[in-house]
Structures are given as structure tokens and as C-alpha cells.
Amino acid sequence: MPHFREQEFFGGAIKGIVPQGWIDSSTLREVPDHQELFLSPKTLSTLIIEINQRVSEEESQSTLSTLNHQFSGPDSTDKAAVIYHLHDLCDEGDTMQILTPPQRVDVPKIPGSAPSGAASVKAYRSAVSFTTPKKEDPSVFATVQCHSLLVRLEAQETDLLVFFNVPREEFEKEGDEAGWNGEVSAAEGTVGALIEKLEICDWGLFV
């Protein structure tokens, strides 16, 4: 299980954690305004915190139809939104496999700070695997496992996303299955810690 440090995102408007020793990518290169990107100092894994326009029900259900997948129940639209955002990460030719379907979780530090009259906050964690054919040899594939958290802020028309991406190739080259399993565990642990620690300090960020 990784050690964590407290971290401010988007100029302190959001607070959370990142794994100890991880590098803020904005100190190395330009990062889009709606995104925070952190890099592992030892592997090719990345942690992304992203603010996006809230996905509509129509967009979500359209994505599910494309993937021949369905969710049922009162939160089916929110679960579909998770898959929409994950599928949006795919490039042409990529395939996506759902490893852990979206599961509702509580983010304890966010609802209590929400503005008066704001709709309830819903959050979902999940995991998928992306497979990409290599340009130099399309018969060879690269695999990335992505562990995610989606926090839906209905009143702000915003989807707050966390992606922890773990490329498998570097571990395969070394025959390091234990290293791969450890990195996947770190991804799971980081998303779990963010569920507990993620906090919105300035709701004006979404205006």
C-alpha cells in the first residue's frame, strides 16, 4: 500500500492526496486547465484529476448501446456516465474491457461542504482495461489498466473524475508479475484514499 501526501488541486479549490514522491507534471510541461496530472517517479503510471461537463443521460445511454452493455436500477444513468467517460479515453482501434463495473461509494468530505440547496453528490468507482494495437506491429497489443472515480455534481453540471492508469508493458518486459500486481494494488489504494480524502474547498471553481 503506497504512502500518501496531502495535495491541493486547481489552485487549492480541491484538496486530496497523491502517492508520496509523485511528480506534478505541470512543473515539467503545460497541462490543460481542466486537468491535474501526476507522474510516478519509478514507473509509467499516471494519476489524473479532471473536471468535465456533466454527461447527459442521452450521451451515456448512447455509449452503452455502442458497447452492447446495460445497467439497471435507479442509478443506471450515473453508471452509464462512468462508462462514457472511460470510453472517451479510447483512441481509434482501442478496445475496452470492464473489469469492475461502476459501484456507488460515499465521498464523505464533499456533500457536507456543498452550497445550500445543491443536489446530492453521487460517486462511483470502477476499473477497466484498455488494449491498443501498436503502430509498428498491429498484431502486438499494449494494455493499460485504469482505476477510476467519478463524482457527479448535478447542481454544478460537472463531472469530477480521477483516473489512475497502469501500463502493463513495462512489467511484462521484465517478467515482473509481482511488480504489476503491486502497482495495481497501489492504484486501488490510491482511488480508495481519494474517496475518503477528496474535498471541495471552493465551489466557485465550477461557476
Image (cartoon, rainbow, N blue to C red):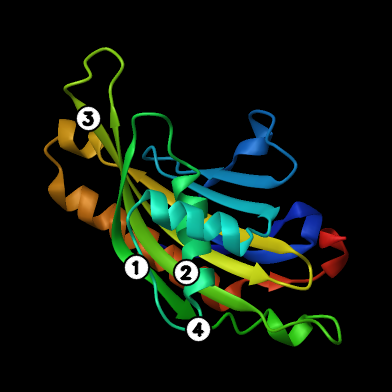
For label 1, count other residues whose C-alpha is less than 10 Å away and answer few (under 14), some (14-19) or many (20+): some
> Which of the 4 image quadrants contains residue 25?
top right
Query: Residue 195: where, in percent of width, then height?
Result: 53, 74
Name the N-terminal-most of marks 1 and 4.
4
Residue at the disc numbered 1: 101
Q: Which residue is mark 4?
A: 74
Q: Say which label, 3 or 2, has the lower sequence index.
A: 2
Label 4 crowd (10 A; few <14 / some 14-19 / many >=20): few
Observer-side mark, 3 or 4, equals 4
Q: Quadrant for the C terminus, please.
A: bottom right
How many marks on residues?
Answer: 4
| Precedes in sequence: disc 3 or disc 1 | 1
> Element at badge 3?
strand
Q: Secondary structure at mark 1?
A: strand
Instruction: Report which residue position mark 2 lands on.
Output: 79
Residue type at mark 1: give it: Pro
Residue in the foreground of this view, choosing between 47 and 178: 47
**Which tag is nearer the camera, tag 3 or tag 1?**
1
Relative placement, left or right, of 170 versus 187 is: left
Q: Quadrant of residue 182?
A: bottom left
**Please, what secondary structure does the residue beneath circle 4 have?**
loop
Residue 137 at what x, y percent from top left? 21, 15
Q: Within 10 Å of the Cα at label 3, are there few (<14), some (14-19), or many (20+) other Cα atoms? A: some
Distance, label 3 to label 4, CA atoms, is 37 Å
Question: Circle 3 is placed at which residue position?
Answer: 141
Amino acid found under the numbered disc labelled 4: Pro
Amino acid type assigned to the residue bearing label 2 in the image = Lys
Pointer 1 and pointer 2: residues touching (CB < 8 Å)? yes
Q: Give me the C-alpha separation between circle 1 and circle 2.
A: 8 Å
Quote the CA–CA distance across marks 3 and 2.
Answer: 28 Å
* Residue 126: mark: none
